[in-house]
Image (tube, rainbow, N blue to C red):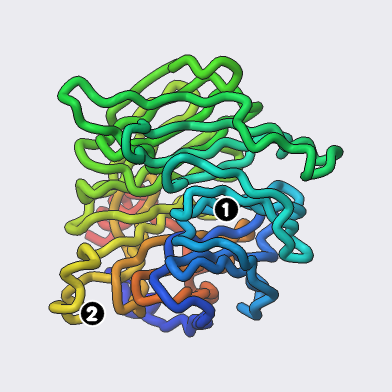
Amino acid sequence: FQPHASKQNDCTMRPILLKGHERSITVVKYNYDGDLLFTASKDHVPSVWRGENGARLGTFNGHKGTIWDLDCCRFSRRLLTASADATSRLWDCETGACLKTFPHRGPVRGVAWADGAQMFATISDPFVEHNAKISVYDVPDKESPNSYSETPRLEIDIPKSNDGKRINPTNVAFLNLNEAIFVTFDNGCIRLYDPDNGDEIEEIFPHEKKINRVSFNKKKTLFITSSADFTSKLYDIVDLKHLKTYKTDRPVNDAVISEHKDHILLGGGQEAMSVTTTAGKVGKFETRFFHLVYETEFGIVKGHFGPINALAISPNGRSYASGAEDGYVRLHFFDKSYLDMKDPVPEEAEEEQKEEQ
């Protein structure tokens, strides 16, 4: 960890390198308790690791395409995956067995459990004459997986924009108490849909370019977007009010909110296709640390040899994981200097300067 300002905090964190994937990482996620880390990549096989030491516990075998997204239920019993093989699958977390396959018309880009884990939503890309779709499936845990319907209970069609372009969804999530389905798009907009009838509730345009990823704090009162327009934005989820903007000089692929400090972690870098011509330092493949309130960058963590595609911070705030285009997941444990670090208060700093003068 390398702070920009003071040299006395200059220290190094030794990450654990998780070498379990053969191709670039697409998603890393902790479960609710933080003891399990789920990772997926373009090699078709999601993996689960122990969060405290990086030991691999197992894999989920069966998909035939890139895994774009995954989501673990609140009590880590069932896992959902979204794949480019046009299926979403339901897995038993403990045994790794596939409980049910849900076929779609096009590649499945995202998946999310609802509160209570009795239903879930998926987003799928347009395919041939079919538009992009948001699908909601009922999967009550007291019923046998064999009885689950492969056809969605609700299917929301995403029509083309006014200029005839197809709009692709990029992320999906349920808001608290399943009040709405939250969906981001590649044209920079966010829409809320009614999970009962599929009506569009609200639409905002936080970004001018594609929203790569969105993540929430644990209580789902805040969300942060990551965009190809080189910015990441923090919003209040209740009234969709814009709170903060974190500016960088490269596309932002993922951003996460720390639960125990007022910090934001940003990951990104140059586009993958131009990486081979760039040195690791020039490509700027670091995880960047920002103050949540002051919007200032105060530290970086280097290590990856390609753009960072996914970030996840442990619920206990003591570690974070990053996955990149280089195919590695790096599990970082914060050192004492970071955990003990107190965030500066600008007013106090000004008063101290006056006293010194």
Give the alpha-carbon distance from disc 2 to disc 1, as whole Å.
31 Å
Q: Earlier in the sequence, mark 2 or mark 1?
A: 1
Quadrant of the image containing the C terminus: bottom left
Q: Label 2: state its secondary structure.
A: loop
* Label 2: few (<14), some (14–19) or many (≥20) C-alpha neighbours in 10 Å: some
Residue at the far front in the pictured view: 129
What kind of residue is marked 2?
Gly
Quadrant of the image containing the N terminus: bottom left
Q: Residue at x 43, y 57 (%)?
A: 343
Q: Which mark is residue 280?
A: 2
**In the image, residue 152 lies at what x, y percent?**
60, 30
Q: Dot 1 corresponds to which residue?
A: 81
What kind of residue is marked 1?
Thr
**In the image, residue 237 lies at what x, y percent?**
47, 29
* Label 1: few (<14), some (14–19) or many (≥20) C-alpha neighbours in 10 Å: many
Name the one closer to the observer, 327 or 4: 327
